[in-house]
Amino acid sequence: MSHRVAVIGSGIIGLSTAVCIARSIPDVSVTVISDRPWQETTSYGAGGLWMPYSLGDAQDPELVKKWGKITHEHLERELQSRDAGKKGVFPVTGHEFFKEGPDAHPDPPWRDVVSRFAHATPRELYQFHPHEFKHGWVFSTIICEPRRYLPCLEEEILARGGGFVRKRVGDIYRDLGQAYDLVVNCTGLGARDLVGDQAIAPVQGQVLRVNAPEIKHYYGFDDTTYVIPNTDTVVLGGSTDRVAPDTVNAATDDELSRDILDRCSAYLPSLTAVDLASSSVEKWSGLRPVREAIRLELEEPPPATSDGNETAVPVVHNYGHGGSGFTLFWGCAAEAANLVRKQLNRAADG
Ligand SMILES: Cc1cc2nc3c(=O)[nH]c(=O)nc-3n(C[C@H](O)[C@H](O)[C@H](O)COP(=O)(O)OP(=O)(O)OC[C@H]3O[C@@H](n4cnc5c(N)ncnc54)[C@H](O)[C@@H]3O)c2cc1C
């Protein structure tokens, strides 16, 4: 009999985990359950840049490097595939500029994950005169464009016989324990309510999507001003605001939109041509699911009791990816799928 696995969440983490399970575990039927379509997730509005950013204070950098490397290698394979354009996966040069010197900005642990990493030359820094950048990194990286990539994951899940259900899960055991052998929790910020995890909290980020075909590379100018090209648009950011822990919806702010455009245009003057009032400019705000550290583990069901907890099932948790969901997704999905496989094998043996 095939194993019945439910994955809760249709953002980048849920969809990629569902694909990984369907690809790597024989005889499994995967159902993705979510209370919103992927177009209404945090993942939908992200820039899709591969670069670790905005993670919890207790996050082990070695795990970020490990999951980031697996994801980068996966994206390199996607780049070499026939579907790279359809999936919105393409290489860019990344530029990260700083107003302080290298002592304040030592090389990141991921410098040897990307295929090229160098310090900016004086000429590269001087391009942005008079902004007085003292130091910078220039590196190769990859964009994985959410609005193209997420529907391709959906397509693959369906093609592999998986299904989709739209519903809010209030209690994993009660709502899913009877119908599934194992549940994977990829609910991002939703984990706060679903499993009562107080260690996860929203960090709001606002971006604009504009038409600026002259911009083909990534630029980060300080911690919050950045420009990320997508296939038909360019994402201008941004902001990182800790909001009330129980915030579930993010509204855009007009003043912040103006500020983002002004900041980005100050560095890349071609952006002064963008008309904020134009209907072609999309304003979007989302909540990064930042947890003290990403939760990626198996939770065994509690032992059976006489008062009936027969709906308890094993749960693999995979949430809390902060501002790095598109940087870590495949490494985390592969590890989650591995936990699922081991647990299903153990249940079959026992
Ligand atoms: C402005 C901005 C820009 C960003 N840019 C980048 C970038 O360039 N690169 C990068 O790596 N990352 C970026 N990120 C971060 C990235 O978007 C997140 O890390 C990622 O989207 C998290 O994915 P997720 O699948 O965990 O969560 P989500 O996308 O939020 O998905 C959660 C899913 O869980 C479902 N769900 C929750 N609770 C329940 C429930 N009780 N019952 C049923 N379903 C439930 C929801 O319906 C949803 O489908 C950015 C984020 C923001 C805000």
Image (cartoon, grey):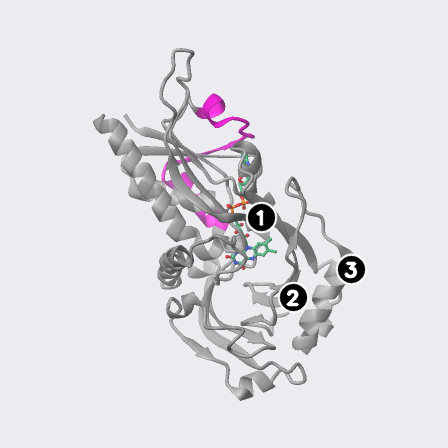
Please, what is the three-letter code of the amino acid marked with disc 1?
Answer: Thr
**Which of 137 and 206 lies nearest the eye of the viewer?**
137
Pointer 1 or 2: first along the chain: 1
User: Which residue bears the numbered disc 3?
Assistant: 255
What kind of element bears circle 3?
helix
- Label 1 CB less than 8 angstroms from ligand 1: yes
Q: Which region is colored magenta?
A: 150-176
Is 190 placed left or right of 300 in the picture? right
The answer to the question of whether label 2 and label 3 lie on touching residues, with beta carbons closer than 8 A, is no
The answer to the question of whether label 1 and label 2 lie on touching residues, with beta carbons closer than 8 A, is no
User: Which residue does the image show at 66% across and 42% down from the upper left?
Assistant: 247
User: Which residue bears the numbered disc 2?
Assistant: 211
Label for residue 134? none
User: Could you say where residue 232 lies in the image, as x and y percent from the top left?
Assistant: 58, 63
Q: Nearer the viewer, mark 2 or mark 3?
A: 3
Pointer 2 or 3: first along the chain: 2
**Which of 65 and 213 lies nearest the eye of the viewer?**
65
Q: Nearer the viewer, mark 1 or mark 2?
A: 1
User: Which residue bears the numbered disc 1?
Assistant: 42
Please, what is the three-letter code of the amino acid marked with disc 2?
Answer: Asn
Is disc 2 surrounded by few (<14), some (14 to 19) or many (20+) residues within 10 Å?
many
Q: Is residue 292 magenta?
A: no
What kind of element bears circle 1?
helix
Please, what is the three-letter code of the amino acid marked with disc 3?
Answer: Glu
